[in-house]
Amino acid sequence: MAGILQTDWLEPAGIASLRLRAGEQHWIAPGRRWRVAADAGYACFELAMHADETVSASAPQDVRSALLEESPVVQTGDPAELSAMLDALPVGERRLVRAVGEAGRQLHATLQGSGEAVFWHPLDADPAGCTALVARAAAPVGLTEYLGRDHAVIEGALAGALRGDLEHARWLRNTLTRHMHFEEDVLFPAYVDAGGQTDWVQGLLRDHQDLSHHLPRLDDPRARRRFLLVLDGHDEREEQIVYPDIMGRLAADAAALATRIMHYPLAMQGACA
């Protein structure tokens, strides 16, 4: 830590503040919501993961689990029926769409023609069809909003995977891989080129490697614990620190990047790809 950094913390009684000075360190417990409120213009700090055996690792919150489990399911093989459903989808609502056959092959194109306020998070795909969470917002969805929603979808799939649901485990692998590929191939390079914090990106990339390493071994308690801790800290760090800085540096390109991630395919062959 160098310079002076003002941070805010969400406590049960309200917002608390903490000022960190050069050389000071502070432990941030998993799940604690915080933000950088202000700095002196020359402050520099490093955020590092740390978790020993005394730190608990929790499954995703119920509200995130419900994102996939409580979404109304629509299954169709008719492209016209699919298009009509998307056109009629009310603002603020979502559907878990299972599109098969010709509807599965046309789902991506249909969404592209529905405007940026109708968007998807693809979950699974094969030559026979596609599964995706589809939602409608009141206005075109921005880059950081979509990425934050993507975190919620990943955690929703994780909740089911931890209960042994094989379909949710596949969704977890697909959505997490897609999210990381977009960040590594598109978002982070653009951010660094715009003068972004390379040390922050390097730390996030290490998290990606850690998550990829432990993802296939969630049935092992130690690997599952490490995965949960890293994912929780990683998502919070991105949403509270990195994404706001990305928006500050890439504001002129944010709309184009939002469109790109919303139409970014799964890292696999199939109807959603």
Image (cartoon, rainbow, N blue to C red):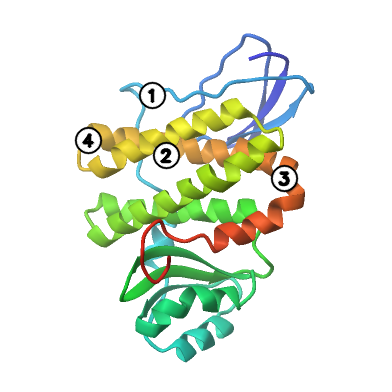
- Looking at the rendered structure, the kind of residue marked 3 is Leu
Q: Position of residue 118 (x, y in %)?
A: 59, 72
- Looking at the rendered structure, the kind of residue marked 2 is Leu
3D distance between C-alphas at marks 1 and 4: 15 Å
Q: Residue reaching furthest right?
A: 41
Identify whether 145 is placed above or below 191.
Answer: below
Q: What residue do we see at 47% from left, 53% from top?
A: 152
Q: Is residue 178 left or right of residue 43?
A: left
Residue pointed to by mark 3: 250
Mark 3 residue element: helix
Return the mark for residue 221. Answer: 4
Query: Mark 1 vs mark 2: which is more N-terminal?
Result: 1
- Mark 4 crowdedness (10 Å alpha carbons): few <14, some 14-19, many ≥20: few
- Looking at the rendered structure, the kind of residue marked 4 is Pro
Residues tagged 2 and 3 counted as in contact (Cβ below 8 A):
no
- Of circles 1 and 3, the one toward us is 3
Residue pointed to by mark 2: 231
Query: Mark 1 vs mark 4: which is more N-terminal?
Result: 1
3D distance between C-alphas at marks 3 and 4: 40 Å
